[in-house]
């Protein structure tokens, strides 16, 4: 088969790495890809947002199956346009991807399907939003609120507000200053949930959903969860908090009702349904849905997979998931993201990265590229915020931690930054396993 993967991050590198290794895959393209992906696939200079260009390319090359990585092209209808052109594609339709593309839609769906989630209010104008915040603050003084831009905002549209003033400022930023453009024309204001967060992945074919592993991500840029939010500075899988019992509860109380609700609305969901959960004292609650794999989470799921990923994704597209069994290695994976100094605000680009082959030569290590490009002399240059996902698989999480940081230390890139404490919740003695690089 000829396969096209769409996207250019660490997630897409992990997907290409797995799909390229499938005996079913005879030719692999990635649009637009990056310097690391170029080792596993032929990169084509088409942006993930260039829907007409991608459809024309897929037709011209006779692509048999397209796998879409990021959310923006899904929400914009890439899968719909490909399928209309007779090209099979993995991922939700635009109508189904609204589960990620509109937080208001997602909250209304959760309410309709009786899925446990934070109490919320949708507000379509700033005056209503301010009024809601004031009355909430009067009734429940001292309670935090979360203000969210309704649409996609590259992970930046969510503000956790400790005071009424902070909530009012967040409303102004989204609705008056239009910091997130059209995405902030509506906001969702919701109750703050306390607990431990976990990323829970499922594959859906419209009617059947199967669990596809758990992970925990680290959103803040610095050790100890300090500093600004990022796309994710590292992840590990499985998440020990996600016991088989809890996983079964999430499938029956959250995922299955959602899938049934989407089908009822005439928006059957196919693809990855990624539930961001808060494990609270009163059980798991849904924070949000994503309509795609997480990044960096994908980089710790895929290396644990024993089964061939490609036929699983095809079964998802074909509505055949009930016939699929998935096998996992009994191993843990941990990914340390290396980013350009200055990330997330202004990452330094163009710096040279050395030692990648030495890192990748370590047992169980794969270095996924997220933002790299090849220099004219064949060197690898940083070309983005998040640049590398240094991933190790081992028999235990502590062993994966040690191996991943051994690989990080083998990489010679003085301008790279990373956290030293990836996995801290699950690895109580992580400090003893690592001496931070000076
Ligand atoms: P989202 O884009 O909805 O995933 O939100 C980004 C992050 O904000 C989440 O990963 C959580 O850490 C946090 N968050 C969002 N909603 C809530 C909530 N209701 N209570 C507590 N934390 C939240
Ligand atoms: N790492 C979180 C996400 O992909 O949304």
Image (spheres, rainbow, N blue to C red):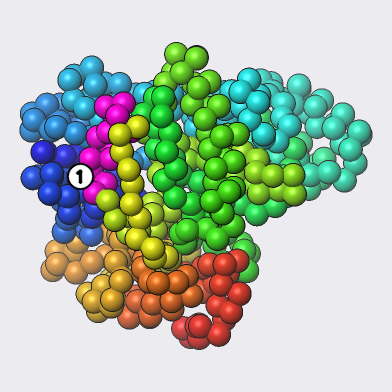
Q: Quadrant of residue 82?
A: top left
SS at badge 1: strand
Tell me the residue at 50%/14% (across/down): 265
**Horizontal and vertical percent for residue 303?**
32, 59
Tell me the residue at 30%/71% (across/down): 364
- Examine the structure image and report whether residue 318 is included in the region drawn in magenta: yes
State which region is magenta.
308-321
Which of 346 and 311 lies nearest the eye of the viewer?
311
- What is the chief secondary structure element of the magenta stretch? helix
- Examine the structure image and report whether residue 292 is included in the region drawn in magenta: no
Per the image, the residue denoted by label 1 is 30
Q: Quadrant of the N terminus?
A: top left
Left/right placement of residue 309 relative to residue 173 reads left
Q: Can the viewer see residue 21?
A: yes
**Horizontal and vertical percent for residue 297?**
43, 53
Which of 405 and 124 lies nearest the eye of the viewer?
405
């Amino acid at each position: 088969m000829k396969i096209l993967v769409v996207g250019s991050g660490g997630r897409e590198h992990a997907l290409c790495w797995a799909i390229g290794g499938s005996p079913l895959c005879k030719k692999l393209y990635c649009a637009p890809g990056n310097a690391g992906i170029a080792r596993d696939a032929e990169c084509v200079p088409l942006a993930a947002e260039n829907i007409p260009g991608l459809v024309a390319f897929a037709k011209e090359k006779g692509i048999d199956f397209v796998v879409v990585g990021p959310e923006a092209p899904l929400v914009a209808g890439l899968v719909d346009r490909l399928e209309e052109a007779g090209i099979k594609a993995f991922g939700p339709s635009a109508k189904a991807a609204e589960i990620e593309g509109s937080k208001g839609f997602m909250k209304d769906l959760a309410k309709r399907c009786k899925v446990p989630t934070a109490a919320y209010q949708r507000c379509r104008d700033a005056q209503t939003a301010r009024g809601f915040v004031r009355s909430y603050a009067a009734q429940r003084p001292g309670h935090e609120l979360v203000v969210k831009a309704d649409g996609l905002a590259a992970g930046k549209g969510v503000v956790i507000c400790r005071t009424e003033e902070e909530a009012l400022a967040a409303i102004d930023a989204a609705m008056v200053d239009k910091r997130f453009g059209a995405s902030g024309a509506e906001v969702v204001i919701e109750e703050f949930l306390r607990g431990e967060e976990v990323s829970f992945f499922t594959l859906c074919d419209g009617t059947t959903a199967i669990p596809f592993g758990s992970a925990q991500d680290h959103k803040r840029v610095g050790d100890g969860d300090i500093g600004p939010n990022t796309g994710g500075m590292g992840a590990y899988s499985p998440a020990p908090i996600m016991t088989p019992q809890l996983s079964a509860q999430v499938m029956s109380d959250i995922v299955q009702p959602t899938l049934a609700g989407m089908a009822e609305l005439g928006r059957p969901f196919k693809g990855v349904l990624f539930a961001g959960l808060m494990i609270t004292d009163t059980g798991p609650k849904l924070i949000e849905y994503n309509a795609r794999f997480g990044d960096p989470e994908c980089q710790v799921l895929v290396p644990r997979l024993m089964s061939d990923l490609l036929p699983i994704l095809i079964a998802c597209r074909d509505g055949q998931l009930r016939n699929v069994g998935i096998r996992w290695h009994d191993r843990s994976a941990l990914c340390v993201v290396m980013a350009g100094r200055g990330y997330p605000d202004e990452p330094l680009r163009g710096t040279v990265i050395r030692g990648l082959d030495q890192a990748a030569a370590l047992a169980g290590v794969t270095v996924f590229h997220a933002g790299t490009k090849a220099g004219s002399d064949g060197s690898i240059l940083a070309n983005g915020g998040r640049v590398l996902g240094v991933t190790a698989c081992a028999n235990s999480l502590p062993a994966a931690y040690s191996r991943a940081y051994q690989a990080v230390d083998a990489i010679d890139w003085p301008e790279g930054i990373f956290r030293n404490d990836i996995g801290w919740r699950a690895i109580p003695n992580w400090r003893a396993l690592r001496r931070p690089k000076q």
